[in-house]
Amino acid sequence: MMPVTGGASFIGSHLVDALLTAGQEQVVLDNFAGGDLKNLPNGVKLVKMDIADARVVEVIVELKPEVVIHAAAQVSVADSMQDPHLDLAVNVQGTANVLEGAKVAGARRVSSSSPRAAGSTASLMTLTKPPCRVRRATTAHTGTSGSATRS
Ligand SMILES: NC(=O)c1ccc[n+]([C@@H]2O[C@H](COP(=O)([O-])OP(=O)(O)OC[C@H]3O[C@@H](n4cnc5c(N)ncnc54)[C@H](O)[C@@H]3O)[C@@H](O)[C@H]2O)c1
């Protein structure tokens, strides 16, 4: 089981596709702040919730994930300038909630698509002591506003 936060996003939904093709059972956690239901393939279990909500920890623990893929993020630079508290809530507290859920569940890894979804490497290492490790795939991304629909 590999839950994907932000699985309805441009990045997340491609990961969901790839994991389904590889035969992995999928659960997407997303609040659709920027993602789109149309991005999700049929048959994917969906938990609609805000990762900034502390209850996401319980949700992840109940899923008993081996790996958590974290792609949920507030990516809009404009929104970030207007409301920095939103970034704090989603990108910092939300990420901390996801890491906590993974740690309590005993997941062996949290994989994140970028610093937007995952904060700095230093903070990740602090939050994810063994057995939970964090892997960051990329480092650069310019945020955009609005819904993400795949081409
Ligand atoms: N698009 C790119 O080219 C690219 C490249 C490298 C890294 N990234 C990173 O990948 C991640 C996803 O980026 P994207 O471009 O797919 O953006 P996106 O806006 O499509 O993805 C964000 C996803 O997170 C969800 N989300 C936002 N706030 C949430 C919340 N509070 N609770 C639950 N879900 C929430 C949105 O609904 C959306 O599905 C980001 O961390 C981004 O920095 C993107």
Image (tube, grey):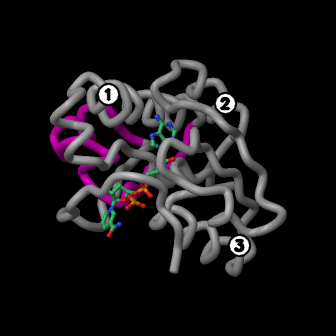
Q: Is residue 125 left or right of residue 64?
A: left
Q: Considering depth in this image, is 59 or 127 the residue closer to the camera?
A: 59
- Judged from the image, the secondary structure of the residue bearing numbered disc 3 is helix
Residue 20 is marked as 3
Amino acid residing under circle 2? Val
Q: Is residue 4 magenta?
A: no
Magenta stretch bounds? 106-130
Give the CA distance from mark 1 to mark 2: 22 Å
Crowding near the residue tagged with mark 1, few <14, some 14–19, many ≥20 C-alpha atoms within 10 Å:
some
Q: Considering depth in this image, is 42 or 101 the residue closer to the camera?
A: 42
Residues under numbered marks 2 and 3 in contact, where contact means CB atoms less than 8 Å apart: no
Q: At which x and y percent is residue 71?
A: 44, 53
User: Badge 1 is on which residue?
Assistant: 86
Q: Is residue 127 magenta?
A: yes
Q: Is residue 38 left or right of residue 149?
A: right
Amino acid residing under circle 3? Leu
Q: Is residue 141 visible?
A: yes
Give the CA distance from mark 2 to mark 3: 21 Å
